[in-house]
Image: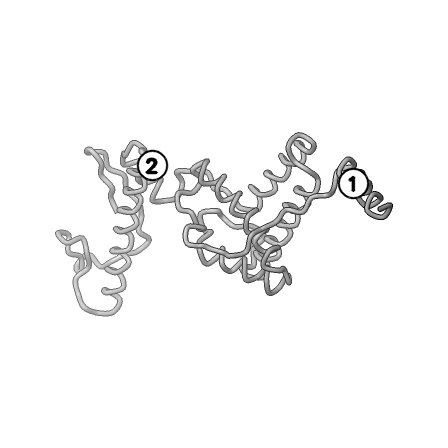
Amino acid sequence: MRITVAGEPKEISTGRECDPARWNAKANRAKGTKEEIRNLNAYLDTLERKVADAHLQLVKDGTEITAETLKLKYLGKDVQRRYLMETFTEHNRRMKTLLGKGFKPNTLKGYNTSVAHLTSYLEKCYGETDIDIRHIDHAFITGYEFFLRSDMGCSAVSAAKYMKHLRKIINQCLAHRWITENPFAFYKTKAKPREKEFLTPDELWNYNKKVETFFSI
């Protein structure tokens, strides 16, 4: 397969072969009606659509379009691969360093639990310990919520909290342009997550004073 932009060609192997006598150079497809010929032409049609999709994505990203950038985009070598659990763990590491500076221990505890739940979900439903964030789709999101409610026995409110944690990580990936499609776009839940926090010493002291006042009356 040859990609040409402004006279600059780049070639990529399709991984298929064809008898030269059966090749239509004008149509760039094999000649014939046998099943193997139809399968080959369908495969070539798919490659052509993938190149067109790669070109469209470069246009959306505002990237300079050359034969090289288009080739790399098509091959998936244009960006560094990012993985969900690796990104989530790094988020929690940063949160830990900011304890007492905007984050509370109980909040970090909840995010660490999210990592444990996601790890279990990946191992059971995908047979993996991590996943390329570009492979996270609507099915992954809804499947994770079902896993939380069924396998982990979470209430609707608790599940909503863990889904909120995952959504935060996805939003960070979108902000960094590591992904361009939001897998949460069509996801909705009626449950509202509640972050439980421990009472501070002052709050506990005030509460005890109110109880003492109540009983003294």
Q: Label 2 amino acid?
A: Asp
Observer-nearest of 202 and 102? 202
Q: Are marks 2 and 1 in contact (CB under 8 Å)?
A: no
Residue 87 drawn at (x, y percent): 55, 41
Q: Is residue 121 left or right of residue 69?
A: right
Left or right relative to 41: residue 141: right
Question: Can you say whether 164 is above or below 42 in the image?
Answer: above
Which residue is denoted by mark 2 in the rendering? Answer: 61
Q: Nearer the viewer, residue 154 or 122?
A: 154
User: Spatial distance from mark 2 to mark 1, Cα to Cα?
Assistant: 52 Å
Give the residue type that dot 1 points to.
Leu
Name which residue lies at 61% across and 42% down: 89
Q: Is residue 186 left or right of residue 144?
A: left
Secondary structure under badge 1?
A: helix
Classify 136 as above or below 213. Answer: below
Residue furthest to the front: 217
Q: Residues within 10 Å of mark 2 (few under 14, many from 20)?
A: few
- Numbered disc in front, either 2 or 1: 1
For this rendering, which residue is in front, 51 or 61?
Answer: 61
> Between 14 and 202, which is closer to the camera in this rendering?
202
Query: Which disc, if any, is residue 204?
Result: 1
Tag of residue 188? none
Please give the name of the residue rendered at 51% of the width and 47% of the height, measured from the top-left corner.
167
Q: Is residue 66 above or below residue 53?
A: above
